[in-house]
Amino acid sequence: MRIAVYPGSFDPITNGHRDIIERASRVFDKVVVGVLRNKSKKPKFTAEERVSFIQLVTGHLDNVEVAAFDGLLVDFAKAHGASVIIKGLRTVNDFEYEFQMALLNKALDSECETMFMMTNSQYSYISSSMVNELAGYKGDLSGLVPAEIIEYIKEKYK
């Protein structure tokens, strides 16, 4: 069974993230979306909220599961039987950072491969931080995040 992990903070999940999850679910037997609890960041949404958002928008994908984690990504991947880490790329800048992380993860676990997936061009400008900034100004989130979670985001910014 080919299992992959797609990690991120997903604060909140965007349509770009959902696109990567859906495409990865067609490539792998199982995709585990890992929601990072990053102690150095102050997320707008709790890990539990982020997990529930992803579960809500990926419920139609039978081979996708969602779990929060902290610690090393390679340890999370190993705990879920994954041999591949999926990283979505929007820009060249994303590649430089993710390439370094892929080399580090390979050094930590030589059995773990990283697969880069280019974001669909229609989502290449979307980031979670941009969504949060726009939401803070009561901007229109249509097309940026899954429609199912827009009201939850608006509620957080009331």
Image (cartoon, rainbow, N blue to C red):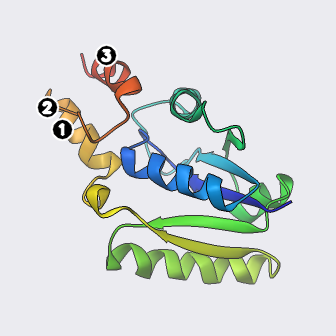
* Lower sequence index among marks 3 and 2: 2
Q: Position of residue 2 (x, y in %)?
A: 80, 62
* Lower sequence index among marks 1 and 2: 1
**Label 3 to label 1, Cα distance in Å?**
14 Å
Q: Residue at x 23, y 34 (%)?
A: 141
Q: Which residue is mark 2?
A: 139
Query: Which image quarter: residue 6?
Result: bottom right
Q: Identify which amino acid the numbered label 2 is placed on.
A: Gly
> In the rendered view of the protein, which quadrant contains the C terminus?
top left
Q: Position of residue 41 (x, y in %)?
A: 45, 48
> In the rendered view of the protein, which quadrant contains the N terminus?
bottom right
Whether residue 72 is visible to the viewer of this picture, yes or no, is: no
Whether residue 139 is visible to the viewer of this picture, yes or no, is: yes
The crowd level at tag 2 (other Cα within 10 Å; few <14, some 14-19, many 20+) is few
The crowd level at tag 3 (other Cα within 10 Å; few <14, some 14-19, many 20+) is few
Q: Position of residue 99 (x, y in %)?
A: 52, 81
Label pair 1/2, CB-CB below 8 angstroms: yes
Q: Identify which amino acid the numbered label 3 is placed on.
A: Glu
Label pair 3/1, CB-CB below 8 angstroms: no
Residue 119, relative to residue 129: is it above or below? below
Q: Which residue is mark 3?
A: 155
Residue 149, relative to residue 143: is it above or below? above
Q: Position of residue 105 (x, y in %)?
A: 68, 75
Query: Which image quarter: residue 67?
Result: top right
Q: Residue at x 59, y 44 (%)?
A: 35
**Label 3 to label 2, Cα distance in Å?**
13 Å
Q: Which residue is mark 1?
A: 134
Report the front residue among 31 and 61: 61
**Label 1 to label 2, Cα distance in Å?**
5 Å
